[in-house]
Image: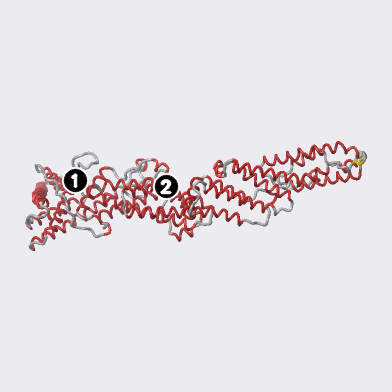
Amino acid sequence: MDSRSQPPNKSSSFSPATTRDDGGRTREVDRNLSLGSGRHRKDHHHHHHHHGPAAASAAAHREQSIREEEDDEDEEEANDGSDLAALSAEIDAFIAGGGQGDVAEPATLERFAAAVERAIARSEGADDKWATTDGDGDGEEHQPPPLLATITRVAALSSALGKHGPGDERVAAAAHRVGAVTQRAMAFLEDEFHGLLEGPKPPPPDEHDRCFLPSAASSAPPPPPPEESSATAAHPPYPPETVRRLRLMADAMVSAGYTTECTQVFLVARRNAFDAALKGLGYDKSSSGSAEEVARMAWEALEPAIASWTRAFRHAANVGLSTEHDLCARVFVGRHAAAGRAVFADLARCVTLHLLSFTDAVARTTRATTEKLFKVLDMYEAVRDAAPIVDAFVLADDCPALNELKAEVAAVRARLCDSAAAIFRELESSIRADAGKQPVPGGAVHPLTRYVMNYVKFACAYNATLEQVFREHNHHTEPEPDKHQNPFAAQLVEVMELLHENLEAKSRLYKDPSLSSIFLMNNGRYMLQKIRGSPEINAMLGGESWARNQSTSLRQYHKNYQRETWSRVLGMLRDDGVITVKGHVQKPVLKERFKQFNAAMDEIHRTQGAWVVSDEQLQSELRVSIAAVVVPAYRSFLGRFAQHFSAGRQTEKYVKLSAEDVETIIDELFDGNATSMARRRT
């Protein structure tokens, strides 16, 4: 059963304390227990002022009294230290026997308990009570501090007495006294453990670049961006000496049966530090909001919150968890390693599940809103990338908390996947639903075309992720998805076909077939330019094949326009056996032809000058192709028939345009300016 959910067990077996050789251990205890006397003496130094014999006598008397008092204290401390050392030998012998021998005298137990209590009392507030001895690395060769050895001994004694069974009343009373001192010692140790975990205030920013600090102070400098953090090893949150002391304290507490107190203090301190580090990345768990609050948030507020979450989650997965795993492994070692693994599993689970709850709230509230796709994909990628990290921890230590975390990561990933797929498919729904009955003025690029193509361009920047999203989504929804087909590419083709069908329908809103062709040409050209400008879209649509088909469609639209607008004009410039009959020019017919041509050019200039071809290359191609057919035909027509009008008023009345004038009119088409030829010429 998990010790974390149980009340602390106060009767854990202790390994026998290290036996002393030549009194070396005893001398360490003596040194520790006599630390107070030096400070006391230092505090009692006084300056002497001579104000006559009486004053001198009084001062001498006071000094004598102080010296006597200090000597008494020194003697008491020395006796206490030697008494504790002597008692420890007897206590160790009893513990070494597993509590099976004769119980020590009640007086011995009482004296030992009292000596331990005094040792703790004197150590409160001392700076160097946890100084270790011997060794200079981060290994196990360090002897525990003398005070810690004393606390360990009284805890082991309490455990041994608990196993010995009831004795006479004096022994029972003494055992109760030892138990009470043990509880006080553990409370003292718990406070010290907590204080060490909280740590000192962080150093100034220029000396400090750690992300996971001992203290949760808000004055910490901003950590590096997540790309930096994930690329470099995490700094340890505590220096080696602090880790060593934490390890020794944890060993004493867990061995004494105070596992729950020890691990809870550790868990709370590291959770606070973790939260502080995430806050430094812009993610504040207190303001991330519940599912209901997220559902009510405006997108303008939710978008930056998602960006902060993504930075924080990536940092937590790539840096934070490994840092905490390493710290737990260093503090809880050997026979206590299981407690450390349990602490890490709890910390990883509670921190990550809180982060994932925000993700889940976003996934559940962003359906049918196409603009949110990219932030949802950012979250999906972060959760996807965290999955193998969590899997590695589960593989290293298979425990319920980590297995729960692994399952939740997979569940949130699936929800984000379904959300992203639904959002992208909403694009198809929005295309189908866009059935506006008002044509775009001038046959320009439709807003729907711009929106869809720009959306597709951004989506293709996530092409690998979207392929993965649709593959996973289809796996959940389709029994046997095609493994060889790129499911995102299939979605993209579907979008392009829907857009094409929508534009064809919109082109029929124009009464003028020529303008319908210009509209389709404009929109088709815009689509082609976007696709050719994006290698990702091009690749998704099957390379050049889609672009070639689109180019073929554009040529057809061009031909349709030429036929609708200019075939009739060119027909006016042909001598089809009506203008010249049996070698004679029929002047009335000729006059009518010039009148028709002038009217047609005026109408084209007035209407098509207001049409829009914003793509300069397409505009130029259209003008050049029109001029190449019309201008030579008109020049030839003028050459044959202009001389049949008498010079002066008659010529001006019918031959209103020169070939250059026609060329100028064509050059002014498609620039969005509605003018008439008459106004232009005046």
How many numbered marks are there? 2
Which three-letter amino acid code belongs to the residue tagged 2?
Answer: Asp
Q: Badge 2 local density, few (<14 within 10 Å), some, or many (20+)?
A: some
- Residue 671 to residue 162: above or below: above
Residue 584 occupies quadrant: top right
Along the viewing direction, whichever of 65 and 659 lies nearer the viewer: 659
> In which quadrant of the rendered image does the N terminus lie?
bottom left
Q: Position of residue 487 (x, y in %)?
A: 52, 49
Identity of the residue drawn at 56% across and 46% down: 457
| Lateral position of residue 503 relative to residue 291, left or right | right
Residue placed under numbered mark 2 in the picture: 385
Please name which of the two marks, 1 or 2, marks the residue nearer to the observer. Answer: 2
| Lateral position of residue 147 relative to residue 433, left or right | left
Residue 71 appears in the figure: no
- Residue 511 to residue 583: above or below: below
> In which quadrant of the rendered image does the C terminus lie?
top right
Residue 594 occupies quadrant: top right
Residue 201 appears in the figure: yes
Look at the numbered disc 2 and give the secondary structure of its residue: helix
Which three-letter amino acid code belongs to the residue tagged 1?
Answer: Pro
Q: Position of residue 161 (x, y in %)?
A: 12, 57
Look at the numbered disc 1 and give the secondary structure of its residue: loop
Disc nearer the start of the sequence (1/2): 1
Determine whether label 1 and label 2 are within 8 Å by CB: no
Identity of the residue drawn at 15% across and 58% down: 179
Q: Which mark is residue 144?
A: 1
